[in-house]
């Protein structure tokens, strides 16, 4: 029996990668990479600390803070900070592990890490959030730096929280440096960064659609889960490209179109305002245009061409995957990290193998949602050079990165995974192998494991 505690989320991410590698010809062609797998699966460093802060009633509160610095073979550790009561080491290790290979797929010089705390921002005042962020950064500032570790936002960490943390770092270290990404535009942030994950997801799926000879987003029906940054901007870009978006959701339930008409940009802006106030979709006034289904996710309540889980991990179950296949969905891509359970992925992959060019096609988050960290990497480059690029420049670079990630996964799958005639290459296998190979090669060249 292992002497290690159970870490179900991390174990799921690890097993998904290992099964992909073992079911390919990678280890036959490069047996030395088996050693890299052992080493890359253990973080280089885990930092855990207490965060003591004072609420508005002058009562002392305490939370657990973490930073998992997983792998720096390709560059400084890079990955978000999550503030949510469910945060623990298993969740952060899974996110950091995925981040290593996602960051490798961007082609930028960034390693992988993740962090956060079990602090719940909901119901907290601006003053309480500021006090927490200052206390959190007081400790974290000892372990990060522009050439060491550059965190970003994640669930519960938006522009406000990034601002509080950046100010606390500057006060503690007496340095102005690009140690956080997702900053405000007037003090080192990059244009297109808030939109990047959602936009990048749509750019990636557009390549899937084109490769499958299914045209473009125009005329397609799209289901999206979540209602945060990723979901909002994925919906806006899909609508801009001519798609009909029929759902959004939050932790309490799903909002589904009742008449088949699309969510509108005006609706999304209203929902974004609600989310900034940390209110539920139940507070959204829509005059009967949508049905709010309490306690549900959208997947069994819609008939769509494209499904984009953009909320959190494991939000598509085996049964929901089967429902999407039965309804005729053709493309599913994760805007969230590990949005599909392994059983759901098995459903999609089995359908891909047995239905030729009629198959549903699945793209994992480490490739499909890499747009956010890609533009974070571009923000780091702008900070280092003390310059700012235009929205058009950043957007064009983002499009190029997402196209390269798609093609890299596609060609890697063709090289290492046997496929029948007429079968779509496995994007999940190709993305996993491509990201792993890049990191393993860098580790080898640096003498990390031989």
Image: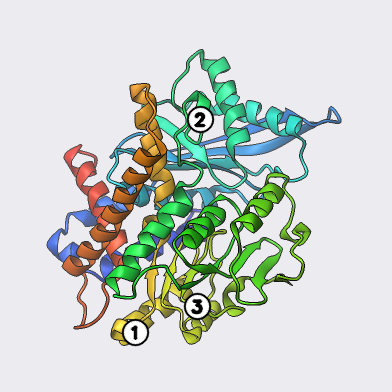
Q: Which residue is mark 3?
A: 321
Q: Residue at the right extreme? A: 57
Q: Residues within 10 Å of mark 3 (few under 14, many from 20)?
A: many
- Where residue 213 sits: x, y (%)? 29, 75
Foreground tag (1 vs 2): 2
Farthest left residue? 29
In the image: residue 86, left or right of residue 389: right
The residue wearing badge 1 is 358
Report which residue position mark 2 lands on. 185
Q: Secondary structure at mark 2?
A: helix
Q: Residue at x 20, y 75 (%)?
A: 418
Q: CA distance from mark 3 to mark 2?
A: 40 Å
The structure residue drawn at horizontal position 27% and vertical position 64%, both measured from the top left corner, is 430
Q: Secondary structure at mark 1?
A: helix
Query: Is residue 19 or residue 257 the one in the foreground?
Result: 257
| Numbered marks: total | 3
Q: For the residues carrying marks 3 and 2, which lies nearer the camera in this image?
A: 2
Q: Marks 2 and 3: in contact by CB < 8 Å?
A: no
């Amino acid at each position: 029996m292992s002497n290690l505690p159970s870490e179900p989320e991390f174990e799921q991410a690890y097993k998904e990668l290992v099964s992909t590698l073992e079911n390919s010809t990678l280890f036959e062609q490069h047996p030395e990479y088996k050693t890299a797998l052992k080493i890359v699966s253990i973080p280089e460093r885990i930092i855990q600390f207490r965060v003591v802060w004072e609420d508005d009633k002058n009562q002392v509160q305490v939370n657990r803070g973490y930073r998992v610095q997983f792998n720096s073979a390709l560059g400084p550790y890079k990955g978000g900070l999550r503030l949510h009561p469910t945060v623990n080491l298993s969740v952060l290790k899974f996110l950091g592990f995925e981040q290593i290979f996602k960051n490798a797929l961007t082609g930028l010089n960034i390693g992988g890490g993740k962090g956060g705390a079990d602090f719940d921002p909901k119901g907290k005042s601006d003053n309480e959030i500021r006090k927490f962020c200052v206390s959190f950064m007081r400790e974290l500032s000892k372990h990060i730096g522009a050439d060491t570790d550059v965190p970003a936002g994640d669930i519960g960490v938006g522009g406000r929280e990034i601002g509080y943390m950046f100010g606390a770092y500057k006060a503690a270290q007496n340095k102005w440096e690009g140690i956080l990404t997702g900053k405000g535009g007037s003090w080192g942030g990059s244009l297109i960064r808030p939109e990047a994950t959602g936009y990048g997801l749509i750019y990636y799926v557009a390549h899937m659609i084109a490769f499958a000879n299914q045209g473009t987003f125009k005329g397609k029906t799209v289901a999206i889960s979540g209602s945060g940054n990723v979901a909002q901007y994925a919906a806006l870009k899909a609508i801009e490209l001519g798609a009909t978006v029929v759902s959004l959701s939050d932790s309490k339930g799903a909002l589904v179109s009742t008449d088949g008409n699309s969510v509108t940009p005006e609706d999304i802006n209203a929902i974004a305002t609600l989310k900034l106030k940390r209110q539920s979709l139940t507070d959204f006034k829509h005059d009967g245009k949508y049905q709010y289904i309490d306690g549900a996710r959208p997947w069994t309540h819609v008939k769509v061409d494209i499904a984009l889980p953009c909320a959190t991990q494991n939000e598509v179950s085996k049964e929901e995957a089967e429902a999407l296949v039965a309804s005729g969905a053709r493309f599913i891509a994760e805007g969230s990290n590990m949005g599909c359970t392994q059983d759901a992925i098995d459903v999609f992959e089995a359908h891909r193998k047995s239905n030729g060019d009629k198959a549903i096609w699945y793209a994992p988050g480490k490739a499909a949602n890499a747009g956010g960290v890609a533009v974070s990497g571009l923000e780091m480059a702008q900070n280092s050079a003390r310059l700012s690029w235009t929205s058009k420049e950043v957007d064009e670079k983002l499009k190029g990165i997402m196209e390269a990630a798609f093609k890299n996964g596609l060609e890697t799958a063709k090289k290492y995974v046997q496929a029948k005639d007429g079968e779509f290459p496995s994007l999940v296998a190709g993305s996993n192998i491509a990201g792993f190979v890049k990191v393993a090669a860098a580790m080898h060249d640096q003498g990390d494991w031989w």
